[in-house]
Image: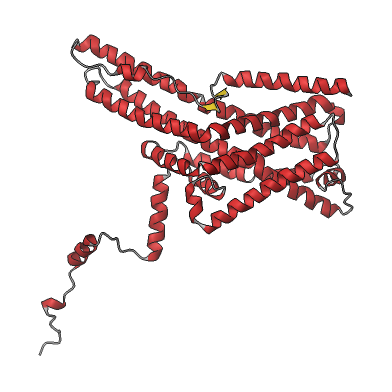
């Protein structure tokens, strides 16, 4: 007798049979743990245009529809709104309790930048579904440039509140600063003074400039990805010979440009009001910093005011400049694409001399030049940078001079 047991054919389980059965059921059999990671990796591939660190933060702030699917993000959204309302309320109460009509103009500009930050959150939350769809569409035609560097930048922006809170606690006159943040109440304990200052400065810095800078970074990344997609089309046209640039290739270029145009219009629809609030908030913040320097002078300028001005002044200046520079690059690249298309088609006409061949440049050149705007009030062009900072200096000096005259 053989020691081996014979198995009948009907007892065999055939792997191809199992695979065909799974395909017939249209299901992929995965363990629950693998299903979770499969969903996460699939989501990242659909949103790859946004760097991973920034994607986590916009989920925590509730700027995309995916935030509504997880309880953790609902908690972070509620917490952020609570912090924003508390920071705005405490700032206004402190300013009104220690009210000085001559200095309130400067403080008012700074307080309004926090109100506008809350307005950015509210308007972005209303457009979160459209933003999710736009990010997915853009991820199909473009990738994020320099994702690793942007992740480092996001990490730096996320620790800014800690840096500012510690930096503010090193002020020379802790008792005055603690009294201001404690709504005019005197705080005797030095430890309590430091705790109040650190808490208030940390919470306010989370709202502005950290949150506003992250929204500005997201806006700039989307604009830059569209610019990169337009640059790719332009380079393809330039590298083709006139013979290759036939009607079918021209039609393919126009179709791809139409997809980019659709995404640009959606970005404009989503960020029109938030981008205007970003520009206005940073404009007011810069004006407040310049105004304090002009009004107080070096002799009366407190140590805390100096640190606050450095922190908010640098942040607001760079935020304003980068938004206008990156968003202003889109119409420049659109114009370059049109010129490359026209020159290549014109060269083909001179080379091929086929007068019966259809021309498609009419559809391209009839379109008006696309320009991002903030509520159709401010055009985001690179030439706007000088005009905006010129207006900033003019109105700040005017406000400070009228304040000095009334003293």
The residue lying furthest to the left in this view is 1
Name the residue rendered at 82%, 39% in the picture. Answer: 96
Q: Quadrant of residue 4?
A: bottom left
The reply to whether residue 202 is visible in this rendering is no
Residue 143 location, x and y as percent? 41, 38
Q: Most extreme residue toward the bottom, as rendered?
A: 1
Quadrant (top left/top right/bottom left/bottom right) for the N terminus: bottom left
Rendered view: 341 above or below 19: above
Total tally of numbered discs in the picture: 0
Left or right: where 49 falls relative to 355: right
The image shows residue 267 at horizontal and vertical percentages of: 47, 34
- Quarter holding residue 170: top right
Res. 142 visible in picture: yes
Tell me the quarter of the picture where residue 90 sits.
top right
Q: Residue at x 87, y 30 (%)?
A: 300
Q: What is the basis of the colouring in this image?
A: secondary structure
- Seen at 82% across and 37% down, the residue is 303
Give the image location of residue 233, x and y in percent: 35, 26
Q: Nearer the viewer, residue 263 or 143?
A: 263
Q: Quadrant of the C terminus?
A: top right
Image x and y of residue 139, in percent: 40, 40
Relative side of 20 to 122, left or right = left
* Residue 378 relative to residue 47: left or right: right
């Amino acid at each position: 007798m053989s020691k081996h047991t014979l198995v009948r054919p009907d007892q065999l389980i055939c792997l191809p049979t199992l695979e065909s059965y799974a395909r017939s059921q249209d299901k992929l059999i995965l363990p629950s743990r693998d299903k979770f990671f499969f969903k996460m990796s699939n989501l990242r591939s659909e949103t790859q245009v946004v760097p991973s660190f920034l994607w986590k933060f916009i989920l925590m702030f509730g700027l995309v529809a995916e935030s509504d699917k997880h309880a953790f993000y609902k908690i972070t959204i509620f917490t952020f709104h609570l912090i924003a309302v508390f920071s705005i309320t405490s700032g206004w109460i402190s300013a009104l309790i220690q009210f000085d009509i001559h200095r309130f103009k400067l403080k008012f500009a700074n307080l309004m930048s926090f109100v506008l930050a809350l307005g950015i959150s509210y308007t972005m939350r209303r457009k979160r579904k459209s933003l999710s769809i736009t990010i997915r569409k853009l991820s199909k035609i473009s990738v994020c440039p320099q994702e690793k560097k942007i992740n480092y930048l996001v990490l730096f922006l996320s620790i800014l509140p800690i840096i500012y809170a510690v930096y503010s606690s090193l002020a020379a006159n802790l008792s005055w600063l603690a009294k201001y943040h404690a709504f005019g109440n005197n705080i005797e304990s030095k430890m309590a003074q430091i705790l109040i200052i650190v808490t208030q400065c940390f919470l306010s810095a989370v709202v502005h400039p950290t949150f506003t800078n992250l929204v500005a970074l997201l806006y700039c990344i989307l604009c830059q990805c569209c610019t990169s997609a337009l640059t790719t089309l332009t380079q393809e046209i330039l590298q083709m010979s006139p013979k290759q640039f036939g009607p079918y290739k021209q039609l393919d270029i126009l179709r791809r440009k139409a997809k980019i145009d659709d995404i640009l219009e959606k970005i404009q629809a989503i960020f029109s009001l938030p981008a205007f609030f970003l520009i206005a908030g940073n404009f007011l913040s810069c004006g407040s910093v310049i105004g304090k320097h002009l009004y107080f002078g070096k002799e009366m300028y407190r140590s805390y005011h100096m640190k606050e001005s450095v922190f908010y002044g640098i942040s607001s200046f760079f935020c304003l400049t980068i938004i206008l520079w990156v968003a202003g690059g889109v119409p420049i690249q659109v114009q370059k694409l049109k010129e490359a298309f026209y020159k290549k088609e014109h060269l083909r006409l001179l080379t091929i001399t086929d007068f019966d061949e259809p021309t498609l440049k009419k559809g391209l050149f009839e379109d008006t030049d696309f320009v991002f705007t903030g509520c159709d009030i401010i055009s985001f062009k690179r030439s706007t940078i000088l005009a905006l900072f010129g207006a900033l200096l003019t109105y700040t000096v005017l406000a400070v001079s009228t304040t000095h005259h009334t003293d």
